Image (cartoon, coloured by chain):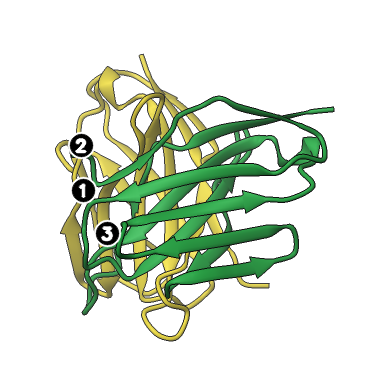
Amino acid sequence: DAEITQSPRHKITETGRQVTLACHQTWNHNNMFWYRQDLGHGLRLIHYSYGVQDTNKGEVSDGYSVSRSNTEDLPLTLESAASSQTSVYFCASSDAGAAKNIQYFGAGTRLSVL
Amino acid sequence: QKEVEQNSGPLSVPEGAIASLNCTYSDRGSQSFFWYRQYSGKSPELIMSIYSNGDKEDGRFTAQLNKASQYVSLLIRDSQPSDSATYLCAVNKSGGSNYKLTFGKGTLLTVNP
């Protein structure tokens, strides 16, 4: 079955370290998205990609970067982790065609920055 | 005005009752509307999508869309304790090649046995 997987599921890091969260999907979807979810804020879009070599900033992109070298993967990098980036991170993907914008989510990564 | 607004709740209903969840959105050109369910500590999962005015039923769930009034609702009939979760409303803004979704903050539903 097609799926979207995130790793690691839990991560503890220190302020100032670079951290990369992985997202891999086997749906063959063109569109991939990274969100963070915090109490009181809901899901907020960090970065998104509509295809290989395409990346775009979302509403909370400062301090984060992504790259899209193939269809399956969209890793999210925190350049220099800050305590404000402690959050739950979700990756999602969607089909640009007939599925009409339905996004499917990975299980999430819980990140703690100490 | 927030782009997608939901009553944060908590909404508490007895088992077997109808739960009614509401969502309003600001972009009149929005074209796709979704309800996701999120259990505590889990990821959002799609339960309903709706694209045109009116009602769409799937089992115990009914989504209702009124584009003129810019609201979308979700009815859960015969509510079960297993329906206790946070329900997220999501909206795709004006179409073309825009595939992004904007999410509301969610409504926490508790179904009491």
From this viewpoint, is residue B18 visible?
yes
Q: Quadrant of residue A51?
A: bottom left
Q: Amino acid at mark 2?
A: Glu
Of the image marks 2 and 1, the number of the one nearer the N terminus: 1
Q: Position of residue A97 (x, y in %)?
A: 40, 85
Chain identifier of the residue bearing label 1 in the image = A
> Spatial distance from mark 2 to mark 1, Cα to Cα?
7 Å
Nearer to us of marks 2 and 1 is: 1
Q: Check the image and report above or below for A51 versus B65.
A: below
Q: Amino acid at mark 3?
A: Tyr
> Spatial distance from mark 1 to mark 3, Cα to Cα?
10 Å
Query: In the depicted view, which residue is nearer to us: A2 or B72?
Result: B72
Q: Position of residue B99 (x, y in %)?
A: 30, 69
Circle on res. A65: 1
Query: In the depicted view, which residue is nearer to us: A23 or B28?
Result: B28
**Residue appearing at x 33%, y 18% in the figure:** A14
Q: Check the image and report above or below for B12 versus A62.
A: above
Q: Which residue is mark 3?
A: A48
Q: Chain B appears what colour?
A: green
Which chain is depicted yellow?
A: A
